[in-house]
Image: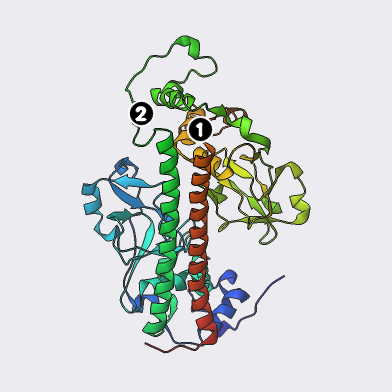
């Protein structure tokens, strides 16, 4: 059992007496921080505020001004592809205090609590909901984001959450966050590393976009306009297993007709073996060990281990058929269905949780197949399968019938090369951003810095 004993005089007045607030790890990190000069966050900022927090569902639009939410805020960068929603210009102008500007530091208030990112100079006009917005005036925002994402920032954020409003950052605790005050030279060094990392991330996105455009160009789907009729008529002979109207939207048949021009085959013809995941219990989870791939770990084209559960060797062996290795492909079958990624080389072995299709591919380039499934080609077909139910779920019997167009080998290789470059740039980006955090942590632990 882990415990700590503290003097009554160490209690922070009557504000916090909960045991979690004084756990040994927090106290050790706090003692290390206090060896250097610090200022509270509200002393080095002109704004610490929360974006709009009331329900805005009635204001959501299919296009317009991006409305950032906590799921859009990652460590160091803002993701405009993760379930992005929009509001109109008129409503955006009313929400002045939650408007987002270049140079703002955004902090996830719930969900992935504590993720911090800086709004880049070329960012579009945007607003925010349930996100903390911070404007700095005495330190560089890139340095602040690196500190907040480091363990010395994260422990303070976690500490502020415990004992307070469940699942949200305590705003008062955030204002009192202790920030190391260092010279401009070090801050500029951190800024260069962060910007270089974000530039590599942009390069990664560019290579991926090139691969996707190449695929769509080969299939004649670039800027292809699918019919979206208000009503349509379907021959009753086609309504066998499905009678829901959405299933027979013209756009699905249009895509099918397009794919037939490329000798499309069913996905099952490219699968050598498969499984659909094992129901591991949360009691099996641990902080280190063999990764367990859950649906939240599968992003579009990549595996994200930032929020990962691990298994012991014993639990890993509970379901041998659901073991996955580098090069295997995984696809989400619930929630955000159809998200597909390949297990990367840095994960030599793992296991897959329930509602995930895991398979080994054959007779097709792996990177190309993953891209096809993540593109409009796979999205529309999987979307069609998932219609008609309250909870979006799909089965292997449905997925195996997804049509995969046959592409020339040289086109597959070009697509794969671009995807590999995208992954390489993403890895370099991750390494640089980790370096920024590490340098801040090392500076704190050495204490060799000059005060502003």
Residue 138 falls left or right of residue 282: left
**SS under mark 1:** helix
Q: Against 239, is 357 above or below?
A: below
Q: Against 104, is 389 above or below?
A: above
* Identity of the residue furthest to the front in this view: 410
* Residue 70 drawn at (x, y percent): 42, 55
**SS under mark 2:** loop
Foreground residue among 58 and 352: 352
* Residue 304 drawn at (x, y percent): 55, 54
Residue 385 falls left or right of residue 79: right
* Residue 171 drawn at (x, y percent): 40, 67
Residue at image mark 2: 226
Foreground residue among 31 and 375: 375
Q: Earlier in the sequence, mark 1 or mark 2?
A: 2
Badge 1 crowding class, 10 Å Cα cut-off, few under 14, some 14 to 19, many 20 or more, is many
Q: Can you say which quadrant of the picture contains the C terminus?
A: bottom left
Residue at x 42%, y 89% (from the top left corner): 450
* Residue 116 drawn at (x, y percent): 43, 65
Give the spatial CA distance, label 1 vs label 2: 16 Å
Please give the label number shown on residue 382.
1
Residue 312 falls left or right of residue 442: right
- How has the structure been colored for display? rainbow
Q: Can you say which quadrant of the picture contains the N terminus?
A: bottom right
Q: Against 451, is 349 above or below?
A: above
Residue at x 35%, y 75% (from the top left corner): 140
Badge 2 crowding class, 10 Å Cα cut-off, few under 14, some 14 to 19, many 20 or more, is some
Foreground residue among 409 and 397: 409
Say which of marks 1 and 2 sits in front: 2
Q: Which quadrant of the view contains residue 212?
A: top left
Residue at x 22%, y 48% (from the top left corner): 89
């Amino acid at each position: 059992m882990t415990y700590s004993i503290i003097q009554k005089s160490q209690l922070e007045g009557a504000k916090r007496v909960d045991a979690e607030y004084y756990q040994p790890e927090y106290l050790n990190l706090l003692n290390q921080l206090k060896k250097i000069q610090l200022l509270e966050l509200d002393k080095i900022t002109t704004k610490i505020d929360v974006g709009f927090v009331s329900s805005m569902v009635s204001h959501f639009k299919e296009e317009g001004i991006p409305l950032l939410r906590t799921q859009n805020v990652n460590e160091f960068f803002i993701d405009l592809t993760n379930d992005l929603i929009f509001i109109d210009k008129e409503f955006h102008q009313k929400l002045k205090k939650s408007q987002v500007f270049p140079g703002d530091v955004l902090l996830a208030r719930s969900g992935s609590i504590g993720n911090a990112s800086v709004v880049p100079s070329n960012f579009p006009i945007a607003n925010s909901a349930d996100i903390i917005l911070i404007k700095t005036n005495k330190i560089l925002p890139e340095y602040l984001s690196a500190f907040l994402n480091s363990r010395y920032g994260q422990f303070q954020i976690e500490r502020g959450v415990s004992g307070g409003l469940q699942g949200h950052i305590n705003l008062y605790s955030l204002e009192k966050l202790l920030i190391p005050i260092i010279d401009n030279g070090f801050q500029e060094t951190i800024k260069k590393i962060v910007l270089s990392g974000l530039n590599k991330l942009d390069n990664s996105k560019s290579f991926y976009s090139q691969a996707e455009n190449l695929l769509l160009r080969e299939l004649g789907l670039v800027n292809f306009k699918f019919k979206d009729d208000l009503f349509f008529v379907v021959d009753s002979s086609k309504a066998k297993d499905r009678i829901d109207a959405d299933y027979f939207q013209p756009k699905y048949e249009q895509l099918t007709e397009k794919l037939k021009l490329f000798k499309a085959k069913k996905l099952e013809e490219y699968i050598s073996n498969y499984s659909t995941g094992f129901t591991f219990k949360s009691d099996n989870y641990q902080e280190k060990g063999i990764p367990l791939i859950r649906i939240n770990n599968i992003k579009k084209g990549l595996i994200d281990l930032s929020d990962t559960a691990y298994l012991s060797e014993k639990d890993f062996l509970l379901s041998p058929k659901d073991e996955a290795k580098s090069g295997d492909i995984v696809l989400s079958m619930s929630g955000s269905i159809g998200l597909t990624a390949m297990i990367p080389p840095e994960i030599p072995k793992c296991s897959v949780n329930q509602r995930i299709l895991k398979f080994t591919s054959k007779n097709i380039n792996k990177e190309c197949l993953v891209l096809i499934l993540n593109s409009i080609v796979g999205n529309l077909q999987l979307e069609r399968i998932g219609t008609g139910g309250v909870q979006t779920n799909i089965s292997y019997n449905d997925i195996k019938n997804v049509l995969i167009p046959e592409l020339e080998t040289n086109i597959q290789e070009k697509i794969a090369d671009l995807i590999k470059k995208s992954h390489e740039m993403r890895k370099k980006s991750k390494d640089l951003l980790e370096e920024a955090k590490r340098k801040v942590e090392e500076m704190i632990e050495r204490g060799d810095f000059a005060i502003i």
